[in-house]
Amino acid sequence: TAQYDVVSIRNDFPILGKQIHGKPLVYLDNAASSQHPVQVIDAIKELYESGYSNIHRGVHQLSQDATKAYEDARASVRGFINADCMHEVLFTSGTTDAINLVAQSYARPLLQKGDEILITHMEHHSNIVPWQMVCEQTGAELKVVPISDKGELEMDRFAELLSERTKLVSVVHVSNALGSVNPIKTIIDAAHAKGVPVLVDGAQSVPHIPVDVQALDCDFYAFSGHKLYGPTGIGVLYGKEKLLNAMPPYRGGGDMILSVSFEGTTYNTLPYKFEAGTPNIAGAIGLGAAIEYVQKIGLSAIAAHEHGLLEYATMELKQIDGLRIIGEADQKAGLVSFVLDTVHPHDIGTMLDAEGVAIRTGHHCAQPVMERYKIPATARASFGMYNTFQEIDVLAKAIDKTIGMFA
Ligand code: PMP
């Protein structure tokens, strides 16, 4: 296998050459949002400089070019997650939008009093609140699979909570707060054995591990472009054709119709039925370019590199007195959440910033996880394909220095 060439990858990301407070930027906030290679920036620039128009309705050349570029991006997504066909790939504005779509368009018409939606204790707020809303609208109940001290799902509890009342399981693939990689294939198979469909929140998985929606046999899979080296404001909902066809549109407007009259409106076919209004054309094209970039390097190579970073960072951070890692699942993706005995996470973030190290501090939109471990917040270093072992050394040194300053 070819050597993983992290130096040439870094050279593709202009921002990584930046200095912060006079120090080289060490960007370890990839779980919040990742940076962009020139290939993505150029694809967007090229669109606006020479190929831009609204799509789908125009007969003129630019509109046809932009339409082709937009649909080519959909084809890239299809290949990336191995969806069976293009019209199972819906562009959304992100993971949050995709989950809300499923909550309102799939679950809401179906749910009745006494029905249940099953999620887990390690969900991001965007995989909690849409279900709370739909439960309020329908009288259904939200059930929650607990997590262990290590940060793993309690699978025996999952098996108990999955019942004939369960109408949908919605579960995160990789936790953004703990890094845990959940056994989603096992979850999907168990749910299907009871006839229950499964939505997977893939916001933190698609940048780090290969995903094949057909092999998983998931019913819905949601992710965001901006954590995958692509633009903000674009995301994907994969859904099985049979389910999507039976669902009513989520939003009404242009492009999602075949014909409109005041007597009645007929809806467009998939995927357009779910893409009302002018979509994020540049976002989709940028995401397509990001996917091509990731595929060129290869997700297995990226996963192996990031796993090395994770092991190294875990080892380094564990040597620091007074540092506690939150989330030590056996299966983890590239992030480390931690707290210090003597320094509040917010102060860790500020101190590290002074050293050029960008990490995230707070509850990471997963307040139930913080409540579970009885902490207000964590500091989180999250890795991307361009991070280096030397950057982990800088991180560890900066944490040491922080502890020294607060001693
Ligand atoms: N789920 C998880 C696990 C996430 O990490 C995030 C982003 N932090 C989201 C959902 C929401 O993604 P977005 O804000 O792009 O809609």
Image: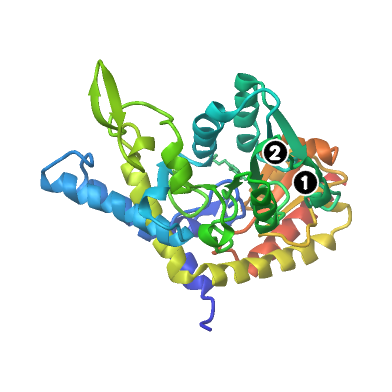
Which element carries disc 1, helix, strand or loop?
helix
Q: Is residue 219 left or right of residue 128?
A: left
Image coordinates of residue 307 in percent, x first then y, are 66, 67
The mark that comes first in sequence, 2 or 1, is 2
**Residue at x-position 61% and y-position 24%:** 133
The numbered disc on residue 2 is none
What is the quadrant of residue 263 in the picture? top left
Q: Which residue is mark 1?
A: 158
Q: Is residue 49 left or right of residue 292?
A: left
Label 1 sits on what residue type? Phe
**Mark 2–mark 1 contact, CB under 8 Å?**
yes
What is the quadrant of residue 185 in the picture? bottom right
User: Can the viewer see residue 49 in this picture?
Assistant: no
**Residue at x-position 57% and y-position 50%:** 202
Q: CA distance from mark 2 to mark 1?
A: 9 Å
Ligand 1 near label 2 (Cβ, under 8 Å)? no
Which of 401/148 is in front?
Answer: 148
For disc 2, the neighbor class at 10 Å (few under 14, some 14 to 19, many from 20) is: many
Image coordinates of residue 260 in percent, x first then y, are 24, 24
User: Can the viewer see residue 148 in this picture?
Assistant: yes
**Residue at x-position 30% and y-position 56%:** 72
Ligand 1 near label 1 (Cβ, under 8 Å)? no
Which of 134/114 is in front?
Answer: 114
Which of 392/137 is in front?
Answer: 137
Q: Residue furthest left?
A: 60
Image coordinates of residue 84 in percent, x first then y, are 43, 58
Q: Which residue is mark 2?
A: 118
